[in-house]
Amino acid sequence: MKVAIYPGSFDPITNGHLDIIRRALSIFDRLVVAVADNSNKKHLFSVKERMDMIRKATESLPVDVDSFDGLLVDYLKKKDVHTIVRSLRANSDFESEFQMAVVNRELDKDIESVFLMTDKEYFYLSSSAVKEVARHGGDVSHWVHDSVREKLREIFR
Ligand code: ADP
Protein backbone atom coordinates (compact mmCIF):
# COMPACT_ATOMS: atom_id res chain seq x y z
CA MET A 1 0.00 0.00 0.00
CA LYS A 2 1.41 3.38 -1.03
CA VAL A 3 1.06 5.93 1.75
CA ALA A 4 2.19 9.58 1.85
CA ILE A 5 2.06 12.36 4.38
CA TYR A 6 0.66 15.79 3.50
CA PRO A 7 1.90 18.15 6.22
CA GLY A 8 0.89 21.77 6.71
CA SER A 9 -0.67 24.39 8.90
CA PHE A 10 -4.17 24.03 7.44
CA ASP A 11 -5.33 27.11 9.35
CA PRO A 12 -7.96 26.43 8.01
CA ILE A 13 -8.12 23.79 5.26
CA THR A 14 -9.25 25.31 1.92
CA ASN A 15 -10.56 23.88 -1.35
CA GLY A 16 -6.99 24.28 -2.69
CA HIS A 17 -5.74 21.84 -0.04
CA LEU A 18 -8.69 19.54 -0.78
CA ASP A 19 -7.87 19.53 -4.48
CA ILE A 20 -4.29 18.47 -3.66
CA ILE A 21 -5.60 15.75 -1.31
CA ARG A 22 -7.92 14.33 -3.99
CA ARG A 23 -5.21 14.40 -6.63
CA ALA A 24 -2.62 12.88 -4.30
CA LEU A 25 -5.06 10.03 -3.76
CA SER A 26 -4.85 9.19 -7.47
CA ILE A 27 -1.16 8.43 -6.85
CA PHE A 28 -1.24 7.09 -3.29
CA ASP A 29 -3.63 4.58 -1.71
CA ARG A 30 -3.79 6.48 1.56
CA LEU A 31 -2.86 9.94 2.71
CA VAL A 32 -2.06 11.15 6.20
CA VAL A 33 -2.96 14.82 6.51
CA ALA A 34 -0.74 16.01 9.35
CA VAL A 35 -1.34 19.33 11.09
CA ALA A 36 1.91 20.95 12.20
CA ASP A 37 1.73 21.91 15.86
CA ASN A 38 4.16 24.76 15.42
CA SER A 39 3.97 27.24 18.26
CA ASN A 40 6.31 29.68 16.43
CA LYS A 41 3.48 30.53 14.08
CA LYS A 42 0.38 32.36 15.18
CA HIS A 43 -2.75 30.43 14.27
CA LEU A 44 -6.43 31.33 14.30
CA PHE A 45 -7.56 27.77 15.07
CA SER A 46 -6.21 25.26 17.59
CA VAL A 47 -4.67 22.03 16.32
CA LYS A 48 -7.79 20.17 17.44
CA GLU A 49 -10.11 22.56 15.59
CA ARG A 50 -7.98 22.32 12.44
CA MET A 51 -8.02 18.51 12.64
CA ASP A 52 -11.80 18.45 13.14
CA MET A 53 -12.35 20.64 10.07
CA ILE A 54 -10.05 18.41 7.97
CA ARG A 55 -11.93 15.30 9.18
CA LYS A 56 -15.27 16.78 8.17
CA ALA A 57 -13.99 17.95 4.78
CA THR A 58 -12.36 14.60 3.92
CA GLU A 59 -15.04 12.33 5.38
CA SER A 60 -15.49 10.04 2.38
CA LEU A 61 -11.80 9.84 1.43
CA PRO A 62 -9.06 7.34 2.45
CA VAL A 63 -7.43 9.96 4.65
CA ASP A 64 -6.07 9.82 8.21
CA VAL A 65 -5.92 13.09 10.09
CA ASP A 66 -3.13 13.52 12.59
CA SER A 67 -0.86 16.18 14.12
CA PHE A 68 2.83 16.35 14.85
CA ASP A 69 5.35 18.59 16.53
CA GLY A 70 9.10 18.66 16.15
CA LEU A 71 10.85 17.60 12.98
CA LEU A 72 8.77 16.33 10.10
CA VAL A 73 11.43 13.69 9.30
CA ASP A 74 11.09 12.26 12.83
CA TYR A 75 7.33 12.09 12.39
CA LEU A 76 7.71 10.26 9.07
CA LYS A 77 10.11 7.80 10.68
CA LYS A 78 7.64 7.17 13.49
CA LYS A 79 4.86 6.50 10.98
CA ASP A 80 7.21 4.46 8.74
CA VAL A 81 6.27 6.61 5.72
CA HIS A 82 8.85 7.86 3.20
CA THR A 83 6.96 10.32 1.02
CA ILE A 84 5.92 13.91 1.67
CA VAL A 85 3.29 15.61 -0.49
CA ARG A 86 3.44 19.38 -0.86
CA SER A 87 2.13 21.76 -3.45
CA LEU A 88 3.35 24.69 -5.48
CA ARG A 89 1.30 27.77 -6.22
CA ALA A 90 3.04 31.03 -7.13
CA ASN A 91 6.77 31.38 -7.84
CA SER A 92 7.24 32.46 -4.27
CA ASP A 93 6.33 28.94 -3.03
CA PHE A 94 9.19 27.40 -4.97
CA GLU A 95 12.08 28.77 -2.96
CA SER A 96 10.77 27.84 0.48
CA GLU A 97 9.45 24.45 -0.68
CA PHE A 98 12.75 23.66 -2.41
CA GLN A 99 14.70 24.61 0.70
CA MET A 100 12.47 22.50 2.93
CA ALA A 101 12.69 19.47 0.61
CA VAL A 102 16.49 19.69 0.48
CA VAL A 103 16.79 20.04 4.26
CA ASN A 104 14.45 17.10 4.83
CA ARG A 105 16.45 14.93 2.43
CA GLU A 106 19.69 15.99 4.11
CA LEU A 107 18.21 14.88 7.42
CA ASP A 108 16.96 11.59 6.03
CA LYS A 109 18.09 10.24 2.66
CA ASP A 110 15.15 7.83 2.45
CA ILE A 111 12.61 10.64 2.27
CA GLU A 112 11.27 11.91 -1.03
CA SER A 113 9.10 15.01 -1.47
CA VAL A 114 6.49 14.99 -4.21
CA PHE A 115 5.09 18.29 -5.49
CA LEU A 116 1.73 18.69 -7.11
CA MET A 117 1.03 21.84 -9.07
CA THR A 118 -2.01 23.72 -7.83
CA ASP A 119 -5.01 23.87 -10.12
CA LYS A 120 -5.37 27.26 -11.85
CA GLU A 121 -8.62 27.72 -9.97
CA TYR A 122 -6.80 27.72 -6.61
CA PHE A 123 -3.63 29.50 -7.64
CA TYR A 124 -4.52 32.64 -5.69
CA LEU A 125 -6.14 30.84 -2.74
CA SER A 126 -4.50 30.74 0.69
CA SER A 127 -5.70 30.16 4.24
CA SER A 128 -4.64 33.75 5.03
CA ALA A 129 -6.80 35.20 2.25
CA VAL A 130 -9.78 33.14 3.42
CA LYS A 131 -9.33 34.42 7.02
CA GLU A 132 -8.99 38.01 5.87
CA VAL A 133 -12.16 37.88 3.78
CA ALA A 134 -14.11 36.08 6.54
CA ARG A 135 -12.88 38.55 9.15
CA HIS A 136 -14.55 41.34 7.18
CA GLY A 137 -17.78 39.43 6.66
CA GLY A 138 -17.11 38.42 3.02
CA ASP A 139 -18.46 35.24 1.43
CA VAL A 140 -15.91 32.40 1.49
CA SER A 141 -18.26 29.59 0.47
CA HIS A 142 -16.49 29.10 -2.90
CA TRP A 143 -13.16 28.53 -1.18
CA VAL A 144 -13.84 26.29 1.81
CA HIS A 145 -15.92 23.31 2.95
CA ASP A 146 -19.22 24.18 4.68
CA SER A 147 -17.90 23.14 8.10
CA VAL A 148 -14.99 25.58 7.74
CA ARG A 149 -17.32 28.38 6.67
CA GLU A 150 -19.44 27.75 9.77
CA LYS A 151 -16.36 27.79 12.06
CA LEU A 152 -15.20 31.06 10.53
CA ARG A 153 -18.64 32.56 10.96
CA GLU A 154 -18.64 31.52 14.63
CA ILE A 155 -15.22 32.97 15.33
CA PHE A 156 -15.81 36.32 13.59
CA ARG A 157 -19.36 36.81 14.81
P1 ADP B 1 2.41 25.66 5.58
O1 ADP B 1 2.38 26.69 6.66
O2 ADP B 1 3.09 24.38 5.98
O3 ADP B 1 2.85 26.15 4.23
P2 ADP B 1 -0.28 25.55 4.50
O4 ADP B 1 -1.48 24.97 5.15
O5 ADP B 1 -0.31 26.98 4.11
O6 ADP B 1 0.90 25.18 5.47
O7 ADP B 1 0.06 24.71 3.18
C1 ADP B 1 0.28 23.33 3.18
C2 ADP B 1 0.58 22.90 1.75
O8 ADP B 1 -0.56 23.11 0.94
C3 ADP B 1 1.72 23.68 1.09
O9 ADP B 1 2.47 22.80 0.26
C4 ADP B 1 1.01 24.71 0.26
O10 ADP B 1 1.77 25.09 -0.89
C5 ADP B 1 -0.23 23.94 -0.16
N1 ADP B 1 -1.35 24.85 -0.46
C6 ADP B 1 -1.82 25.86 0.26
N2 ADP B 1 -2.84 26.50 -0.36
C7 ADP B 1 -3.00 25.85 -1.55
C8 ADP B 1 -3.85 26.04 -2.70
N3 ADP B 1 -4.71 27.05 -2.76
N4 ADP B 1 -3.74 25.19 -3.73
C9 ADP B 1 -2.84 24.20 -3.68
N5 ADP B 1 -1.98 23.98 -2.66
C10 ADP B 1 -2.06 24.79 -1.61
Image: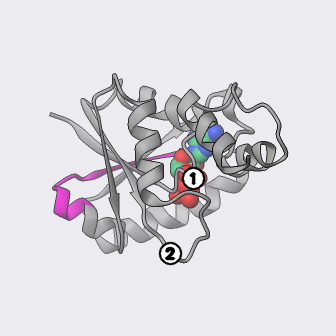
Query: Please, what is the three-letter code of the amino acid marked with disc 1?
Result: Asp
Q: Position of residue 156 (x, y in %)?
A: 73, 49
The residue under the point 57% across, 47% down is 12
The residue carrying pointer 1 sits among few (fewer than 14), some (14 to 19) or many (20 or more) residues within 10 Å by Cα, namely: many
Q: Vertically, is 71 above or below 157?
A: below
| SS for callout 1 | loop
Separation of marks 1 and 2 at Cα, in angstroms: 13 Å
Q: Give the tally of numbered discs.
A: 2
Residue 88 visible, this orientation: no
Q: Magenta stretch?
A: 76-89
Q: Is any part of residue 11 visible from this angle?
A: yes
Q: Amino acid at mark 2?
A: Ser
Task: Evaluate if marks 1 and 2 touch, with contact meaning CB atoms under 8 Å apart.
Answer: no
User: Which mark is on residue 11?
Assistant: 1
In this rendering, position of residue 95 left or right of residue 116: right
Please tell me whether residue 83 belongs to the stretch shown in magenta: yes
What is the residue that sits farthest to the bottom in this orientation?
A: 40
Q: Which residue is mark 2?
A: 39
